[in-house]
Image (cartoon, rainbow, N blue to C red):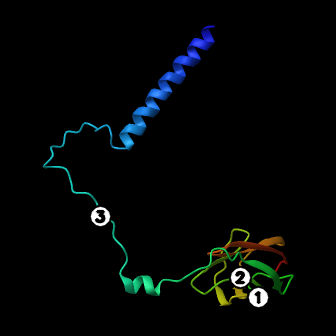
């Protein structure tokens, strides 16, 4: 019986707090402030980019998820250049990154929608995931890294 009373009071308090929050957010209850009407700032007007910037912005297809299908050579050694083949790598502006495990290579190069190149960073020998990141998502392919 006592637990039921506590539960009802808790729900009532939460409901009242929720109602106040909704009314405040909706602008139906005015929050008190030390500002006078003359001190209140004018509403912020949204801004847009100039038409020239919008026209030159890259258009990336976020529904085209990338997929790595092959990495050559495999196995690889640190410092070696690899070729990453696949699909849906997007455009140069939409191709974002290549990593080995969580290590960024010194350099990578976007070649086209299905090819990228990268230099293998210094890594411990073993199986290492190669990741690519595009505007459409990420893909992974595991390669074997040999010792130097």
Above/below status of 41 relative to 95: above
Mark 2–mark 1 distance (CA, rounded to whole Å): 15 Å
- Mark 2 residue crowding within 10 angstroms, few (<14) / some (14–19) / many (20+): many
The crowd level at tag 3 (other Cα within 10 Å; few <14, some 14-19, many 20+) is few
Q: Residue 119, located in which quarter of the rendered image?
A: bottom right
- Residue 142 image-quadrant placement: bottom right
Residue 26 is left or right of residue 8, and the answer is: left
Q: Position of residue 22 (x, y in %)?
A: 42, 39
Task: Report helix, strand or loop for mark 1.
Answer: strand
The disc, 1 or 3, on the residue closer to the chain's N-terminal end is: 3
Front in this rendered view, residue 74 or 138: 138
Q: Could you tell which of marks 2 and 1 lies nearer the N-terminus?
A: 1
Write the residue at 83% across / 83% down: 70
* Residue at left offset 63%, top offset 74%: 62
Using the image, determine if residue 23 lies above or below residue 112.
above
* 26, 82: nearer the viewer: 26
Looking at the image, is mark 2 or mark 1 nearer the viewer? 2
To which residue does mark 3 refer?
45
The location of residue 20, given as percent across then percent down, is: 40, 33
- Rendered-image quadrant of the C terminus: bottom right
Task: Give the residue number, with chain letter if any, for mark 2.
Answer: 88
Disc 1 and disc 3: Cα gap in Å?
48 Å
Kindly identify which numbered label has been placed on residue 83. Answer: 1
Specify few, some or many for label 1: CA neighbours under 10 Å numbering under 14, 14-19, or 20 or more.
Answer: some
The picture places residue 118, in percent across and down from the top left corner, at: 70, 85
Secondary structure state at the residue bearing disc 2:
loop
N-terminal-most mark, 2 or 3: 3
């Amino acid at each position: 019986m006592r637990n039921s009373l506590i539960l009802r009071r808790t729900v009532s308090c939460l409901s009242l707090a929720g109602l106040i929050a909704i009314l405040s957010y909706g602008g139906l209850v005015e929050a008190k402030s030390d500002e006078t009407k003359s001190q209140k700032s004018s509403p912020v007007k949204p801004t847009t980019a100039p038409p020239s910037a919008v026209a030159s912005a890259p258009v990336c297809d976020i529904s085209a998820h990338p997929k790595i299908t092959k990495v050559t050579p495999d196995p690889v050694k640190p410092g070696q250049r690899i070729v990453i083949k696949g699909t849906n790598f997007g455009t140069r502006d939409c191709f974002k990154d290549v990593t080995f495990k969580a290590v960024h290579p010194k350099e990578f190069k976007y070649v086209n929608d299905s090819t990228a190149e990268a230099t293998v960073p210094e890594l411990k020998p073993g199986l290492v995931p190669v990741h690519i990141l595009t505007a459409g998502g990420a893909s992974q392919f595991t390669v074997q890294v040999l010792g130097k």
